Image (cartoon, rainbow, N blue to C red):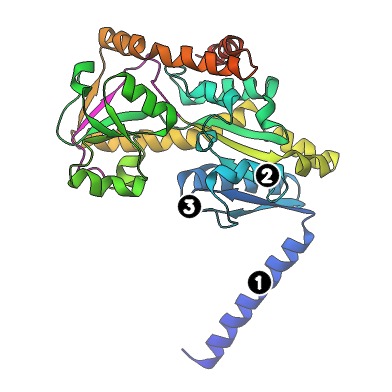
Amino acid sequence: MKFGQVARRLSAAALMCGVAALSAQAREVTFRFHSFVHATSYQQVKFFEPWCKRIEEQSGGRMGCQIFPSMQLGGAPSDLFNQARDGIVDIAYGNPGYSPGSYLSAEVFELPFMMRDLHDAARGMHDYFTANPGPELAGLHLIAVAPADFPVIQTASKPIRKMEDLQGVKLRSAGRYGAKVLEALGALPVQMAAGEITDSLSRGVIDGAYLPWSAVSLLNLGSLMHHYTDFAEGQDRMYTSLQLVMMGQGTYDRLPDDLKKIIDENSTPETSAEFADAFASTANTELEALRKASADIYLLPEDEYERWRAAVAHITEDWIKDANAKGMDGQKMLDMARAAIAARQQ
């Protein structure tokens, strides 16, 4: 490359950096957005980045985000909400399930057979948390809430058609309540990091996993999992984990009224439905790919579905007792959560 070309490219790069610097200086607010997922995750690409771009455009560039994926600002995923609450970061994406027992008002949505559609559930959950944030979420301002895409039972060699087929089957479990439902059905839940699943399958440490559709290609499981058991349309799903995007209340309170209004307009039930679509659209893409590959996908018939519901009913009863023991009205919380979802169910 000639010297003149190099000089022109360097000048262009310097100009771009200068524009970026001026743009950053023109902002009144740059939110530090901390997340446990990586920069190319569907959560960031499909929701975090569009949301940040939208508030920047609507504020005329006065506010925007700097996203820090993969816990780049330090701490563990279980620390994220406290980081936002304490002002260490401004916005945090986290999962209450990483702090078992600490977010009972949120855990109600992880109980068995609470919901069937991600978008409707997200709208209902947003309604619930707006009206009933619970003491655990004090100091936090809701941006969006959604259920993760629903896990399905994935096995390497043994097809699961009925409850008896699960007896003694070792499955990598998804979350605290995911493990509870598997155990209630007779399976042996195994806790391990997602990165260990492939090797554990090949060595026979586990027989399969209880994971969402989106994990199949993410973890390269397509050549290892040969059978999938899912629920049919119209059936409530057995488990999901709760996902929350929260702004620190202190951060929100410091904003001028016109910028607060923009945040409010981008923190609605429809915002949560948009967040849910990041999970739903990814799951649908994965599911369609498996169908085209003629994967063995089995949907539970209604009579078997009712057997599974009955087998795990005690988990909800135990949660009510636990909530009551901690000074909450467990039955009331459960009824309100179910009513919030039912009101949005189409």
Circle 3 is placed at which residue position? 38
Element under disc 2: helix
Circle 1 Cα neighbour tier, 10 Å, few/some/many (<14 / 14–19 / ≥20): few
Residue 342 pos. (x, y %): 53, 11
Circle 3 Cα neighbour tier, 10 Å, few/some/many (<14 / 14–19 / ≥20): some
Residue 3 pos. (x, y %): 53, 92
Counting residues from the start of the chain, the first of labels 2 and 1 encountered is 1
Circle 1 is placed at which residue position? 17
Residue 271 pos. (x, y %): 61, 32
Magenta span: 221-240
Viewer-nearest of labels 3 and 2? 2
Q: Is residue 238 magenta?
A: yes
Query: Measured along the vertical axis of the image, is residue 191 above or below residue 23?
Result: above
Q: How many marks?
A: 3
Closest to the observer, 95 or 319: 319
Element under disc 3: loop
Instruction: Residue at 59%, 45% (x, y): give it.
Output: 79
Counting residues from the start of the chain, the first of labels 1 and 3 encountered is 1
Question: Callout 2, which amino acid?
Answer: Ala
Circle 2 is placed at which residue position? 84
Element under disc 1: helix
Question: Callout 3, which amino acid?
Answer: His
Viewer-nearest of labels 2 and 1? 2
